[in-house]
Image (spheres, grey):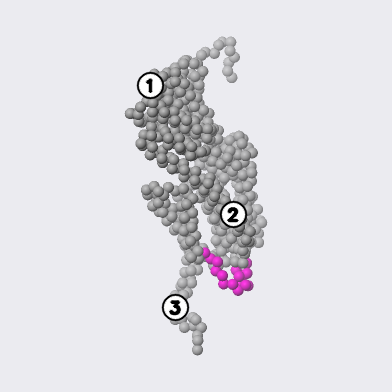
Amino acid sequence: MATRRGTDESPADKRAGANRAAAEHYLPPLVALVGLVLLIVATLLTGSLGAVLAGCVGLVLLAVGAAPAMIARRRRTVLSLLIVIYLAVIAGVTSYGLIKKTLPHPSLAFRWQYWTTAARAYVDQPVTGLGRENFSPAYMRYKPAASTEEVRNPHNLWLNLLVELGPLGLVGGALLSLLVVRRTLYSIGTADATQATRATHETDVDDRLMPAQAVPVAVGVLLVHALLSGTPFARAGVALVWLVDIGFKWGGAFALAAWLLYGMGGRSAGRNWLTTGLLAAICASLVHALLSFALLTPGGLAMFALCAAGAATWAQPAEARVIRGSRLMVAIVGAGALVAYFGLILLPMSATAAALDELDRAARAGRPLAAAERVVAVSQHDPAAARAAARTLLHMAAQVDDAPADRRREWLAAASECALTAAKRDPLDSGTRALVAEVSGALARFERARGNDAAADEHLESAARAWSEAVARYPTNPRTRIIAGQAWLALWQRTHDVGFSDVAREDFERARAIDQQRPPNDVVRLRQKELDEIDSGLRALPPVSPVPASAPAAE
């Protein structure tokens, strides 16, 4: 007579089975709790005020996982409450800053400088915005003298969207974020209904993330990253560093996350906790976005998108299917994005990198001209490549002492062309104008050493005017003003034009005034040598013409 399976199990086998079941039930939550504690400690060790604040918000929201049914009954109320609190925080911080003209914490005080300067820069392009990654030149132009930091973004997601992409970019980002939060919130509590639906249909489908599914996903992600990141694997040691620093770390984190999903995803309570955790992560990132730019970086945005995708699909019934038209649309958009990435980003970047490598080899061989021209031609709209070519040629002309004079003149002339090309490609950058000035100054010294005073004076005036253009694009940089003052002083000494001496005096005096507005112990304060250069320059200038007695006194 046949017996049913399991009736002849020994007590030891039953205890072993019970222990395995208990381990499968309690071990994943325990590991997740340990990971949470470690993350809290790591966040506190960073000393980042924004990260700690965002973590606290995430922990508070994570607590709602203990009452998913209550959240499911009051979704609209909870969503409205989240929106009101978020907007109230923004309004409160803004009001405090407007009243006090700063914020209470030193880190927040710096951010207030970023935000107020961003508001001034926004006026330049209030409809379309400045364009992505164009904040830095505007910040350098408008930032106050007391602000010593040079930043590339205002460290606030919403202000960043407004200044760079205009009102439409701000509205679009806000709507996307609201939809993500709403969809995640509405997924909490649906796991019980999904479980009941499956029980009604007597299905035993287990849609948890299985190891057989996780491995190809992990390998696929790493392959896509290796293919699209533009990492120079051909260089010695890069492949090993990439495998250790990216592949191993990401693979380990992914394996742990996949195991936790497999262990907790089979029960409705686990699903509710996971969905709540995704909501906490999304909201915490939006809180941190008030003080950072992480969501506008590839890594931060990818993490936000993964959380949003997981929250949108985690609690869906197994019977839900994506319609064929949607799959086709996703395939078309994905293929188009890949083609655009290869054509517009990866291939130009690879061609520019290859041209720069060729320039380096040509410079070592003493024949950089043709390679520099190729860099400028291949890089198309990239100012950084043109700047690199100009600096290479400038370095060659300065360092290769045994090169014939005609060849050094050619290198300097080509460096000037490359620098001017970079300035055309990036007309608002102060550093590019400074590079133009450096090349013009080198040409002036070269011609002066060979007795060509007329050509030297022409290049010297070009250098002085380029330094003034750099100052106009970064008015609160005292060091640029000192160099500009020295250039105008040298030009006055050659021509005795009073207008040149007036510009030099203004640059020297303004450089000292800017330095005096900064904190006494700030590391960017001018050194004594630089202060001596200001005093020496002012002494070399002619005295200021006295104001005639009949002239009205200045107010």
Write down the residue under mark 1. 449
Secondary structure beneath dot 3 equals helix
Q: Which residue is more in the foreground, 221 or 294? A: 221
Q: Residue at x 48, y 37 (%)?
A: 377
Is residue 254 in sight in this rendering? Answer: no
Secondary structure beneath dot 1 equals helix
* 243 relative to 262 in the view: left or right: left
| Mark 1 nearby-residue class (10 Å; few <14, some 14–19, many ≥20) | few
Q: Nearer the viewer, mark 2 or mark 1?
A: 2
Write down the residue under mark 3. 13
Write down the residue under mark 2. 332
User: Residue 199 appears at what percent x and percent y?
Assistant: 61, 72
Examine the structure image and report whether residue 202 is included in the region drawn in magenta.
yes
Q: Residue at x 44, y 58 (%)?
A: 252
Pointers 2 and 1 in contact (C-beta within 8 Å): no
| Mark 2 nearby-residue class (10 Å; few <14, some 14–19, many ≥20) | few
Q: Residue at x 56, y 64 (%)?
A: 271
